[in-house]
Image (cartoon, helix red, strand yellow):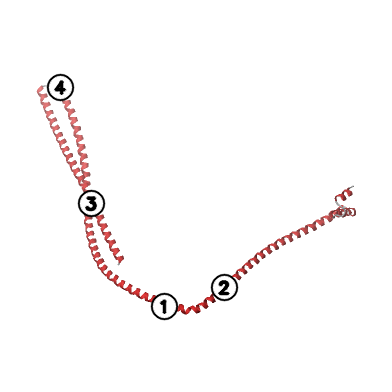
Amino acid sequence: MALNTFYKEFPPNSDEARLKEEVRQLLEENDRSYLESALKSEMDHLKKRQKFANELARQKRSMEQTIAELSEELKHRKNTRMRKKEACHDLDEFIKRKRQIDEKMKVDLPEMRLASKKTFYERLKNAEETFDEKRKEIEKLKEENDALAVVVESLQNEYESMHTQITVERKEKLEKINSILETNQSFASEVDDLHVRLEVVVREKSTLQSSMIALKDQLSVYEVQYEHLVSSSVNPEDVQRLLDKQKADSEAQMGRLQQDKTEALNLRVKLEKELAELRSRHVSLKKEVSDLERARTVAEKKCRKAQECLHKMSQDI
């Protein structure tokens, strides 16, 4: 039944059927271990052939790569050969044109020599005429230069004189400024002293006012004592003499205090007047210093302008 099924699936004339038949005969003729050994040997042989086939495939790929590289190199050499061939062709064309030009030059060279000679002499003549014109211009410029040299010398002398004058004036103004600054510093010191003195006067005034208040308080005490004495049994004449004496002393002390107050007020008025004069003088000195600074700036500008003018004249020469 199995054999019939085998022959149905694999016809007798097919290779697989033939192989199946051979396998069946081998199974009938030999045992299974022999077939397994033979199959293993065949598998080893097949692996070796497969390895050999892989090696052949690798060699094939290497050869294909080498062939491709050789093809590229061959293509490159063909292109190089074509370029060299084109270069040779261009060189032949160049040599051909050069020969034609040489032949033409042999014919045109005498005429070109004559034309060049004529052009040279014409240019030489024009150069001589131009040289004569330039020489005349140089002589004219030399005369102008001599005249300008005289002007420059005059300007130089004027500049030196002006510079000397400005230097002297500047020195004098600097000395004046220094003197004004010293005076200003002295005035500032005096103003500080006046401020100190004014503070002393203010303190003295405050002391006098305190003394006047104390005297008024003392006078009130005296009046209370007087009333007490009047009401007592003391002799009125003695009390009156004592009161007169105390009143005279108080009036004398009040007079002295009033005189000191008047002197302090007069001194304060005098100090304030002197302070106002010093401030006015200080403002005047500051204005004078500012005027001197402006004058110095104007003089420096004039000096620089003269230097620039002299430098420009030197460059023009």
Dot 3 alpha-carbon crowd within 10 angstroms: few under 14, some 14 to 19, many 20 or more: few
Give residue 93's mark: 2
> Residue 12 versus residue 107: which sits nearer the camera?
107
Inspect the image, locate mark 4, and give the three-letter code of the amino acid beneath it. Answer: Glu
How far apart are labels 2 and 4 at the CA level? Answer: 157 Å
* Label 2 vs 4, first from the N-terminus: 2
Q: What number is the disc on residue 102?
A: none
Q: In the shown orientation, is residue 46 left or right of residue 282?
A: right
Q: Position of residue 205 (x, y in %)?
A: 19, 36
Q: In terms of secondary structure, where does tag 4 sit?
A: helix
The percent position of residue 81, horizontal first and vertical second, equals 62, 69
Q: Amino acid at mark 1?
A: Lys
From the top left corner, tell me how far across and down residue 46 is, in percent: 79, 57
* Disc marking residue 291: 3
Q: Which mark is residue 227?
A: 4
Number of dots carrying numbers? 4
Q: Is residue 163 above or below residue 287?
A: below
Disc 4 crowd rating (10 Å Cα; few below 14, some 14-19, many 20+) is few
Circle number at residue 118: 1
